[in-house]
């Protein structure tokens, strides 16, 4: 059965989508069967996987409203080597429509359960707000991967996220836990980043992943070509870091089972 992880952080611009698509591509490269679920109406994870969000016949919106199954709505990203349940602007309307429906925070969980045996990993790219969409993601997941920059404001946002996860764990999803914190866009030349990194390790211990994702131009360029950085330039520092991260994830999940 698939291990389901949300890539979440209430702070915007921390590299959630970059982390999701590159971890997915890295896991595919090390032989894992992967599904990416794009829960952000901007559809960046869809486009970053080489799928045109404007041309999608069915999206995660249809799956949440139960007018299509995951098997019907998913697309294959041939170049990246994983499946995608895509999103586009339609998804913004799901916020309003879900409020009226029964089991509104459990709909994604139900949909994923039907296909869980087809994958080793399901990665959910969450929007930066705590919305009904994010709630669906967190209620579906076994754990949360938190990408974060080593900056002061990132620590502030992390406290809010930890509290949110505790509440959902207590009330809606007893399986939910923080799997790990991933340090992204890291520049070792900046003293403050090194200090925040040390603080994270001191406070969260083993919850901080060993892998560090460096600030890397090739990772930033890749989405404009509709590819994860791991596929766009496999020789770049960023690509090597994400493949190391994928291996670390496989190892960590093995220890969880």
Image (cartoon, rainbow, N blue to C red):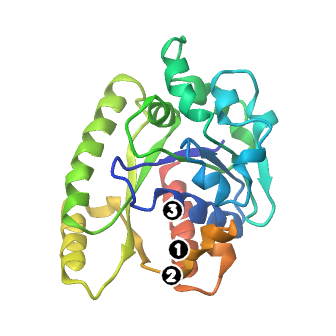
The residue depicted at 72 percent of the width and 30 percent of the height is 114
In the picture, measured across the screen, residue 73 lies left or right of residue 245, that is right
Could you tell me if the residues under marks 3 and 1 are in contact, i.e. CB atoms within 8 Å? no
110 horizontally vs 8: left or right: right
Q: Residue at x 68, y 44 (%)?
A: 86
According to the picture, the residue beneath numbered tag 1 turns out to be 220
Horizontal and vertical percent position of residue 77: 77, 58
The local crowd at label 3, few if under 14, some if 14 to 19, many if 20 or more residues have their Cα within 10 Å, is: many
Q: Is residue 140 left or right of residue 169?
A: right
Q: Residue 19, which numbered label?
A: 3
Instruction: Reply above or below: 124 against 63.
Output: below
Q: Quadrant of the N terminus?
A: top right
On residue 29, the disc is: none
Q: Secondary structure at mark 1?
A: helix
Q: Count neighbours of disc 2 (C-alpha within 10 A) and say few if under 14, some if 14 to 19, many if 20 or more.
A: few
Q: Residue 146, position in %: x, y?
A: 39, 55
Residue at 65% x, 21% y is: 65
The Cα–Cα distance between marks 2 and 3, rounded to whole angstroms, is 14 Å
Residue named by callout 2: 217
Q: Secondary structure at mark 3?
A: helix
Q: Position of residue 176 (x, y in %)?
A: 41, 38
């Amino acid at each position: 059965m698939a291990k389901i992880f949300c890539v979440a952080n209430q702070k915007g611009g921390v590299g959630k989508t970059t982390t999701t698509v590159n971890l997915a591509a890295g896991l595919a490269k090390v032989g894992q069967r992967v599904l990416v679920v794009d829960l952000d109406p901007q559809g960046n994870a869809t486009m970053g996987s080489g799928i045109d969000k404007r041309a999608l016949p069915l999206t995660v919106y249809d799956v949440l409203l139960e007018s299509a199954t995951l098997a019907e709505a998913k697309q294959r990203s041939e170049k990246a080597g994983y499946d995608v349940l895509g999103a586009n602007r339609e998804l913004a309307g799901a916020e309003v429509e879900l409020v009226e429906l029964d089991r509104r925070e459990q709909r994604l969980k139900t949909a994923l359960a039907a296909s869980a045996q087809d994958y080793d990993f399901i990665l959910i790219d969450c929007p930066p707000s705590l919305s009904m969409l994010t709630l669906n993601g967190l209620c579906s997941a076994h754990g949360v991967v938190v990408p974060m920059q080593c900056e002061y404001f990132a620590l502030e946002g992390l406290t809010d996220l930890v509290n949110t996860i505790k509440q959902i764990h207590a009330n809606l999803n007893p399986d939910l836990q923080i799997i790990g914190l991933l340090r992204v866009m890291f520049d070792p030349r900046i003293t403050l980043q090194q200090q925040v990194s040390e603080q994270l390790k001191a406070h969260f211990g083993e919850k901080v992943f060993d892998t560090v994702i460096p600030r890397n131009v090739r990772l930033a360029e890749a989405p404009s070509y509709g590819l994860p950085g791991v596929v766009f330039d496999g020789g770049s520092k960023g690509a090597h870091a994400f493949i190391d991260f994928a291996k670390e994830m496989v190892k960590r999940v093995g220890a969880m089972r």
